[in-house]
Image: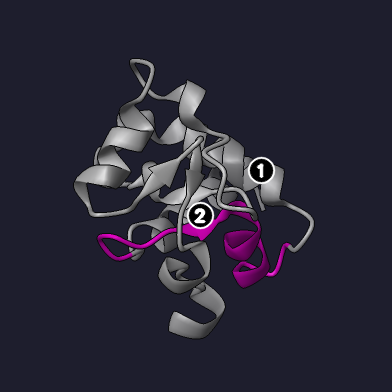
Amino acid sequence: MSIEGFFERVYEVAVQIPFGRVTSYGAIAIYLGASGSARMVGWAMNSSGKLPDVPAHRVVNRNGLLTGKHHFQGTNLMQQLLESEGVEIKDNKVQDFKNIFWDPNIEL
């Protein structure tokens, strides 16, 4: 599969993340059958800026950290987008991570 094809599959999963929920790069990779490809999922999220329907702000690292925030315009856009959906962020980390975590392996 090409990188573009992989990215498209990542976007197909990401657009299904519900408002006010988050998932991780690794959870998407596992769902796609590419368990060692969390970093590639991150690259896909980084490249999704031209696709406004892809909620890249809802994808965080496995510990709930906003590791991708530097790819958003402005200094706190990722956090602001999540907070506008009711997600509490403290010290660049999603609070109550386990309860708002959306696992595509269970949900899809």
**Residue 99 drawn above or below residue 44:** below
Asked if residue 19 lies in the magenta stretch, the reply is yes
Question: Could you tell me residue 44's position as x and y percent?
Answer: 53, 40
Q: Quarter holding the C terminus?
A: bottom left
Question: Could you tell me residue 64's position as x and y percent?
Answer: 56, 51
- Residue 50 visible in the snapshot: yes
Q: Which residues are magenta?
A: 18-34
Mark 1 neighbour class, 10 Å CA radius: few under 14, some 14 to 19, many 20 or more: some
Give the farthest residue toward the right.
Answer: 36
> Mark 1: which amino acid?
Met
The residue that disc 2 covers is 10
Which residue: 72% across, 62% down?
Answer: 34
> Mark 2: which amino acid?
Val
Which residue: 36% across, 36% down?
Answer: 79
Give the farthest residue toward the top.
Answer: 74
Mark 1 in CB contact with mark 2 (< 8 angstroms): yes
**Residue 19 drawn above or below residue 55:** below
In this image, 18 relative to 67: left or right?
left
Which residue: 39% across, 24% down?
Answer: 72
| Marks 1 and 2, the one that precedes in the sequence | 2
Give the farthest residue toward the front.
Answer: 90
Label 1: which secondary element: helix
Asked if residue 8 lies in the magenta stretch, the reply is no
Which residue: 40% across, 44% down?
Answer: 89
The residue that disc 1 covers is 40
Mark 2 neighbour class, 10 Å CA radius: few under 14, some 14 to 19, many 20 or more: many
Question: Could you tell me residue 95's position as x and y percent?
Answer: 46, 55
**CA separation, marks 1 and 2?**
9 Å
Q: Nearer the viewer, residue 77 or 30?
A: 77
Question: Could you tell me residue 55's position as x and y percent?
Answer: 33, 47
